[in-house]
């Protein structure tokens, strides 16, 4: 820490004001670390969880250490009363962090957090179901190919079903990744632009799949009035599922870093 402080102080790219803030942040960090050793295991664990959430916001080092200082003070005071940090907050730890982050850093909590989680849940479910189905087809294709090789002596594994299962497996993994990223980026405003790219990419992919299925179904139902009406109805229902990539994009947009002068 002393070496880090020395590097900060001798950095010629820092203005005098920034150097002063950096020195103050380093001093607070050292003081906070020392006081943290007096916390109980429960309070230290709760503090680390809250600070992990705080660090997902684009705050300055001095602001982060100031928030840590305030939380440490509350934890130490709670310990003198035989209580815990969490019980002294008066609300959920994350909600309390949102308040103190806005008070010290002027940053509001991510407005698109819930939307990203909803989209993430959808893509994780669809991806998991698709992955299980694709792996099952892939396994059956491998078994069929092994049987064919054993009985005829020739490889017959590269069938259309086998190739399609590989493609579907890749797509299922992509959906799982999209869902995982949505959850990962939900609380991190610094990742909002990455989340936006994922949302746009999934919207394009879902639209392409929708058009592909629509063309295939219309071709199958050609000449059959009942099947045509059923296809159009099913296509209308399927269109509603495009709301999830839209929620992904809206959530990412609302998660962009905002300061006090912006409304969310």
Image (cartoon, rainbow, N blue to C red):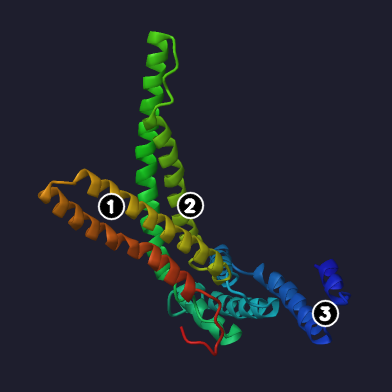
Give coordinates of residue 254: x percent, y percent: 47, 76
Give coordinates of residue 8: x percent, y percent: 83, 74
Q: Is residue 149 above or below residue 158?
A: above
Give coordinates of residue 193: x percent, y percent: 55, 68
Does the residue at mark 2 contact the one at mark 3 (Cβ under 8 Å)? no
Which one is in front in this view, the residue at disc 2 or the one at disc 3? Answer: 2
Q: Nearer the viewer, residue 210 or 95?
A: 210
- Please give left or right for residue 132 compared with residue 52 in the image: left
Question: Which residue corresponds to mark 1?
Answer: 214
Task: Looking at this view, name the residue that lies furthest to the front.
Answer: 223
Task: Looking at this view, name the residue that lies furthest to the bottom.
Answer: 261
Residue at figure coordinates x 56%, y 79% from the top left: 74
Question: Which residue corresponds to mark 3?
Answer: 14
Q: CA distance from mark 1 to mark 2?
A: 26 Å
Does the residue at mark 1 contact the one at mark 3 (Cβ under 8 Å)? no
Task: Looking at this view, name the residue that lies furthest to the left.
Answer: 226
Name the element at disc 3.
loop
Name the element at disc 2.
helix
Residue at figure coordinates x 11%, y 50% from the top left: 225
- Please give left or right for residue 112 compared with residue 224 in the image: right
Q: CA distance from mark 1 to mark 3?
A: 59 Å
Badge 1 crowding class, 10 Å Cα cut-off, few under 14, some 14 to 19, many 20 or more, is some
Q: Which mark is residue 177?
A: 2
Which one is in front in this view, the residue at disc 1 or the one at disc 2? Answer: 1
Q: Nearer the viewer, residue 107 or 192?
A: 192
Q: Nearer the viewer, residue 180 or 137?
A: 137
Does the residue at mark 1 contact the one at mark 2 (Cβ under 8 Å)? no
């Amino acid at each position: 820490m002393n070496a880090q402080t020395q590097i900060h102080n001798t950095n010629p790219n820092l203005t005098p004001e920034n150097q002063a803030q950096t020195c103050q942040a380093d001093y607070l960090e050292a003081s906070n670390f020392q006081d943290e050793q007096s916390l109980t295991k429960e309070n230290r664990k709760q503090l680390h969880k809250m600070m992990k959430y705080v660090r997902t916001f684009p705050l300055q080092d001095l602001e982060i250490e100031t928030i840590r200082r305030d939380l440490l003070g509350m934890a130490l005071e709670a310990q003198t009363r035989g209580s815990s940090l969490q019980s002294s907050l008066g609300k959920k730890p994350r909600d309390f962090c949102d308040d103190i982050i806005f008070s010290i850093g002027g940053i509001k909590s991510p407005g698109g957090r819930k939307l990203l989680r909803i989209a993430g849940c959808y893509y994780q479910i669809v991806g998991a179901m698709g992955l299980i189905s694709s792996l099952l087809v892939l396994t059956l294709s491998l078994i069929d190919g092994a049987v064919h090789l054993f009985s005829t002596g020739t490889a017959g594994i590269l069938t259309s079903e086998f190739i399609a299962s590989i493609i579907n497996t890749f797509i299922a993994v992509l959906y799982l990744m999209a869902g995982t990223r949505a959850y990962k980026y939900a609380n991190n405003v610094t990742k909002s632009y990455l989340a936006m790219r994922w949302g746009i990419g999934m919207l394009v992919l879902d639209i392409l799949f929708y058009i592909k299925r629509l063309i295939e179904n219309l071709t199958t139902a050609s000449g059959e009035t009942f099947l045509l009406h059923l296809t159009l109805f099913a296509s209308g229902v399927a269109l509603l599922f495009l709301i999830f990539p839209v929620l992904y994009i809206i959530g990412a947009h609302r998660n962009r870093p905002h300061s006090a002068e912006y409304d969310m």
